[in-house]
């Protein structure tokens, strides 16, 4: 039983389970009754003091002896003790006063992982400060050897001491439930390092780095804009305005709307209707069934099954339409151009082809030509002989730069246009430095290359783009030499 109060000479007790408190600590004397209650965990000591009508009150020395008698010698609250004995000496009743508290143990922290990698949210807002409604998720992209986070091991904890002076052991920390998954290695100090470039993924049970992101359906407001360091595999379509950026390639089972696709790898999809807004930038090859009203920059080949319609295509490889036509637009291909049909019956749809040129070089030459035109204009207007001399040197330097660019060597360069069936009038073709507007349609399977001896073009029997124009020209030049030698 625990003493609750004392009123009018009557003691009031509360019954307690003997397993939860220590009760054999009642001291009854003539002048007072002292009750010492020790908590079940031996971490606290409470005292109650009931004075009686006869006898002397309790002294400090007596109280200290009683506490020692019950081994209460740790965590004494000197302020509470002083107040307790002072009030006891004055004959004042006191109930359940805390006089000693042990030092609890500090339990060990659980093993945990702290993630350092953060999502790049720079594109959450548009340039005008409005929220980009098409970005509904962020990707935590990491590079190979980036530090992702740190694993902190479980801690043993610090032991405590109870009021009896005994050590109280701590509860050690638990191992974490999160598993270190694939493409993450753990180094000294618990540092987590990405083994590959990709997307950091965290679930309640695992952390990993993935180099493939699969969308099981369409890219729309459910998925949002994608910016991923790896391969993006879309099992549906990409709707208008939902741009996709992926470092290692993009695969789309369906069609692509008016949006931007940017990757350092290959792009494979059914078709695209860019409506003059769509753009594709690929560091590898592009494979599609059709291309409509889209701008393309490609470091590799552009291989299309059916048709290219009214597009701007710039390729450092070859451009091939296997079954249909290149109709309208502009096509520049360093590795050559091939299509069953080139141009259109309608004269209102011009088709411009340039085979064997790097579009980077063409852009640079265009800039130099503008400088050259300005320098020539200044030369014509200048009356100073010294200034004319300076401008003449500048014009010569600009002209030499153009020649140097045009003489660049590219292993895959193939200034050649292959027509499998028909090339319509109103088609403009440029091969090397020669340009021509086709005025009569070509109706035979033909390969067109530059005539290096006389300028203009050679119209030859069809040969695959694997056969380079330079090899054909060398053979023709050799035959001419043999004829001239024989003559």
Image (cartoon, rainbow, N blue to C red):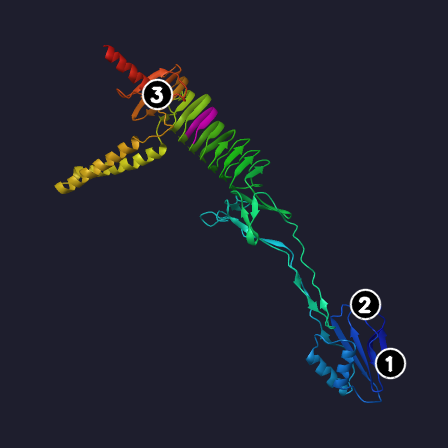
Residue 422: x %, y % from top left: 40, 17
Q: Nearer the viewer, mark 3 or mark 1?
A: 3
- Residue underneath mark 2: 20
Work out whether residue 400 or residue 26 is closer to the camera in this orientation and state it. 26
- Residue underneath mark 3: 471
Indicate whether 88 appears above or below 147.
Answer: below
Task: Indicate which disc residue 10 carries.
Answer: 1
SS of the residue at dot 2? loop
Q: CA distance from mark 3 to mark 2?
A: 100 Å
Residue 341: x %, y % from top left: 42, 20
Work out whether residue 62 or residue 349 is closer to the camera in this orientation and state it. 62
**Magenta includes 207?**
no
Can residue 40 be spotted in the picture?
A: yes
Residue 375: x %, y % from top left: 22, 38
In which image quadrant can residue 236 be found? Answer: top right
The magenta-colored residue range is 300-311
């Amino acid at each position: 039983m625990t003493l609750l109060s004392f009123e009018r000479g009557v003691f009031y007790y509360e019954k307690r389970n003997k397993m939860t408190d220590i009760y054999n600590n009642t001291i009854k004397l003539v002048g007072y009754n002292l009750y010492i209650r020790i908590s079940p965990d031996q971490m606290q000591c409470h005292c109650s003091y009931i004075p009686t009508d006869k006898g002397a009150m309790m002294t400090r020395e007596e109280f200290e002896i009683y506490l020692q008698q019950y081994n209460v010698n740790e965590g004494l609250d000197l302020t509470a003790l002083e107040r307790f004995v002072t009030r006891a000496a004055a004959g004042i009743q006191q109930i359940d006063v805390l006089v000693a508290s042990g030092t609890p143990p500090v339990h060990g922290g659980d093993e945990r992982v702290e993630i350092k990698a953060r999502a790049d949210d720079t594109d959450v807002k548009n340039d005008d400060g409005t929220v980009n409604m098409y970005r509904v998720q962020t990707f935590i992209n990491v590079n190979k050897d980036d530090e992702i986070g740190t694993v902190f091991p479980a801690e043993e904890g610090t032991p405590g001491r109870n009021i009896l002076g005994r050590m109280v052991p701590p509860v050690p920390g638990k191992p974490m439930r999160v598993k270190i998954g694939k493409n993450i290695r753990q180094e000294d100090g618990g540092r987590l390092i990405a083994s590959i470039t990709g997307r950091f993924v965290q679930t309640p049970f695992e952390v990993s780095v993935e180099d493939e992101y699969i969308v099981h359906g369409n890219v729309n407001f459910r998925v949002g804009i994608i910016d991923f360091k790896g391969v993006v595999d879309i099992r549906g379509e990409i709707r208008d305005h939902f741009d996709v950026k992926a470092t290692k390639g993009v695969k789309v089972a369906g069609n692509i709307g008016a949006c931007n696709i940017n990757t350092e790898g290959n792009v494979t999809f059914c078709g695209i209707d860019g409506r003059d807004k769509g753009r594709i930038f690929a560091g590898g090859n592009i494979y599609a069934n059709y291309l409509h009203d889209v701008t393309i920059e490609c470091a590799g080949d552009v291989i299309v099954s059916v048709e290219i319609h009214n597009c701007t295509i710039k390729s450092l490889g070859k451009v091939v339409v296997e079954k249909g036509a290149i109709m309208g637009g502009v096509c520049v291909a360093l590795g050559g151009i091939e299509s069953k049909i080139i141009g259109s019956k309608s004269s209102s749809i011009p088709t411009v082809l340039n085979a064997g040129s790097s579009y980077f070089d063409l852009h640079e030459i265009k800039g130099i030509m503008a400088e050259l035109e300005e320098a020539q204009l200044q030369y014509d207007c200048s009356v100073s002989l010294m200034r004319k001399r300076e401008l003449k040197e500048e014009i010569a330097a600009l002209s030499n730069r153009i020649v140097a660019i045009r003489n660049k060597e590219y292993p895959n360069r193939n200034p050649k246009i292959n027509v499998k069936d028909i090339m319509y009038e109103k088609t403009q073709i440029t091969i090397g430095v020669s340009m021509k507007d086709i005025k009569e349609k070509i109706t035979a399977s033909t390969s067109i290359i530059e005539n290096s001896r006389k300028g203009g073009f050679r119209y030859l029997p069809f040969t695959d783009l694997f056969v380079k124009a330079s090899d054909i020209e060398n053979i023709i030049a050799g035959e001419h030499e043999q004829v001239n030698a024989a003559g």
